[in-house]
Amino acid sequence: MTNKPPKFPFIPPIEIVMPTERFPPVGHCIYCGTYSTKLELEHILPFGIAGDALLLPKASCRTCAHITGTIEQACLRHMWWPFRAKIGAPTSKPNDRPETFTLRRVVRQPNGEFLPAGTSQVSTEEYPLSYVALKLQPPGILEGRPPTTNLEGEIWIRCDEQDFKKYAPNDQDGFFMGPVNPTNFCRFLAKIALGYATAKIGHKNFRPLVRELIRGKSDTPNFWVGGNVDIPLPPANPA
């Protein structure tokens, strides 16, 4: 099979310095418990973030592989798609990298509301470098809070200052930085955590509590997944 050259613009891939670590095969699906002869390899950290850094063989049935693949796509191909394309993150489909992204401008109104201010197509190289994530309260299960469908936290965004000023020059200007689905973000983190715990601790040495959340059968993500909203800002001039 001949690999097609990537579409322009070609973004040099970032270098994954973490060596590949392949763990012993599990032998059943870590997400639903199914034993099968047709189990798939799991990338504990998605390939689109870390390449083949952490591999867990025979760890997912095909049904759950489809479910977790959908979760990853929600983050990698939507929330982080411009960021990943901009930095040249790993991808199994380099020809799918877009040549341009749609920049959606907004203007803040006196009442605090943001209104659309037009769109434009910006090349991948010129698109603002920005990263979007969530800062969540610690998991409810660890703090004794009852399960709830509410997510307690805030959106966390970092953007290159020069890029931001280029496309939002005035104080009330801004632009849309990507769709954020909090539930899928929590499922994404839970998937990574379950895979890593299985690899490092062994599936017989703990009872997984996040399977239902990962498989979309729980609507209380912040009860199982969380963090610390008090993340300090990076130093102004890092060494």
Image (spheres, helix red, strand yellow):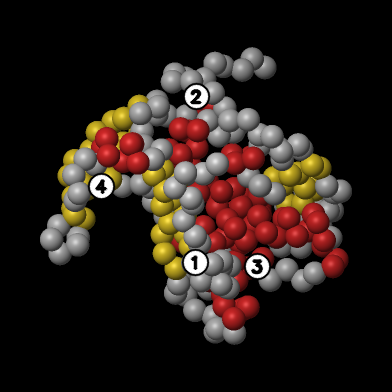
Q: Nearer the viewer, residue 121 or 212?
A: 121
Asked if labels 2 and 1 touch by Cβ distance under 8 angstroms, the answer is no
Which quadrant holds residue 82?
top left
Say which residue label 1 marks: 230
Mark 1 Cα within 10 Å, few/some/many (few <14, many 20+)? few
Say which residue label 3 marks: 210
Q: Residue at x 54, y 23 (%)?
A: 12
Mark 3 Cα within 10 Å, few/some/many (few <14, many 20+)? many
Give the residue type that dot 4 points to. Gly
Q: CA gap, disc 4 to disc 2? A: 26 Å
Label at residue 26: none
Q: Residue at x 53, y 30 (%)?
A: 88
Mark 4 Cα within 10 Å, few/some/many (few <14, many 20+)? many
Label at residue 174: 4
Mark 3 element type: loop
Judge depth for marks 3 and 2 and give the one in front. 2
Residue 93 visible in the snapshot: no
Left or right of 147 on screen, residue 195:
right
Mark 1 element type: loop
Mark 4 element type: strand
* Above or below 168: residue 36: below
Q: CA gap, disc 1 to disc 2? A: 34 Å
Coordinates of residue 175 in the picture (x, y in percent): 28, 45
Pick the quarter of the image with the C terminus: top right
Q: Of the two numbered discs 4 and 1 on the same chain, state the one appearing first in sequence.
A: 4
